[in-house]
Image (cartoon, helix red, strand yellow):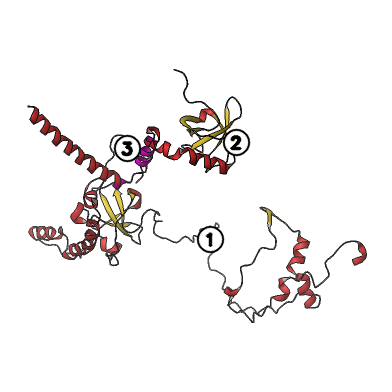
Amino acid sequence: MLGLGQRFPPFHTAFEPAALHRSYTTTESMAPKDRKPHVCRNPDLIRGVGKYSRSKMYHKRGLWAIKAKNGGAFPKHEKKAAAAAPAEKPPKFYPADDVKKPLVNKRKARPTKLRASITPGTVLIILAGRFKGKRVVFLKQLSSGLLLVTGPFKVNGVPLRRVNQSYVIATSTKVDVSGVSVEKFDDKYFGKKVEKKKKKGEGEFFEAEKEEKNTLPHDKKDDQKTVDAALIASIEAVPDLKSYLGARFSLKSGMKPHELVF
Amino acid sequence: MPFKRYVEVGRVALVNYGKDYGKLVVIVDVIDQNRALVDAPDMVRGQINFKRLTLTDIKIDIKRVPNKKTLIAALEAGDVKNKWENSSWGRKLIVQKKRASLNDFDRFKIMLAKIKKAGVVRQELAKLKKEAA
């Protein structure tokens, strides 16, 4: 034992593992959140190689102490009686060849990750479509991932519109949008109106209906006006910002996009 | 025709290639035909090839390989920062840096200012032409 010339730490005193102190019936701290974050007992020397061997780890985990406390064997609890599974009927039909099960897909659909440079109030440059080159104010990201954007309409003719993040350059200029409420706008607001099925009418009747539908409904115009009212006030507070938003962006001679700071 | 800027202990140089590109450094020792020991207040003293340096007109008074404290004191005494920023070379670099860091909005404002200035100049020119005619 101790006379072997090997120094071995005395049995219980100097090397008391945490296992002995931690009570398994969790009387004092019932909520697991109270515990300090646990430090790793076996730090990595390099990936895949721990500092301590299997026997050392057995000793460190204190399994010997738990066994000793329990009289020589590791404490067991009774297995819960498994609930009797309902008797399954054998299937009526076995397919001739093995049918492959499709792989499990746990991906969740979520809106496109918004670039860190795009925050509410950022001035964006639209790069494609009928408004290409227009500088526009960003309002919010909709649940489909598209960006809700407005000119404002009075400044540059861009209405409340959806725009894809990929077709946009974010500048570092920010406009104050605290006075604007954008809660009511979502993808459904911008969706195409579903037409009720009309009975077959005569030729003239049909044309009259079509012409009515081309104008914007009044409530959308009012929405535009309310959003823009607060925005235009904060835009006019900054000198030159209104003319900046009214002007289109274009690449001139000597401008190198990869060297430009937007 | 003769050389005016010499490699010597105390010569201030501009790094023109490498990790410390654009920094002003002081030559504190010459290692061999190609390399110098170089130091600056915000970097660890190290060797650099002469080909990576461009010598400036500024020279400070130090002994060979001073310690950092002495070097910083000598830079203050020689007023290197102000001399550099007032020299035409230093001013050009500052303007280049400013232009490179301009925002899209800044570029727009500069365009408006340029147009305004050109308008004023053209008006004055028209006045002068009228008087001369």
Examine the rendering and report whether any part of residue A249 can be seen: no
Q: Earlier in the sequence, mark 3 or mark 1?
A: 1
Q: Is residue B97 magenta?
A: yes
Residue A3 shown in magenta? no
For the point 63% across and 81% down, the residue is A28
Cα separation, mark 1 vs mark 2, equals: 87 Å
- Disc 3 to disc 1, how far (Cα)? 66 Å
Q: Residues within 10 Å of mark 1 (few under 14, many from 20)?
A: few
Q: Residue at x 21, y 49 (%)?
A: A243
The residue under the point 61% across, 73% down is: A35
Main SS of residues in magenta: helix
Give the residues drawn in magenta, as a range: B92-105
Tell me the residue that label 1 is attached to: A95
**Same-chain check, marks 1 and 2:** no
Tag of residue B65 = 2
Label 1: which secondary element: loop
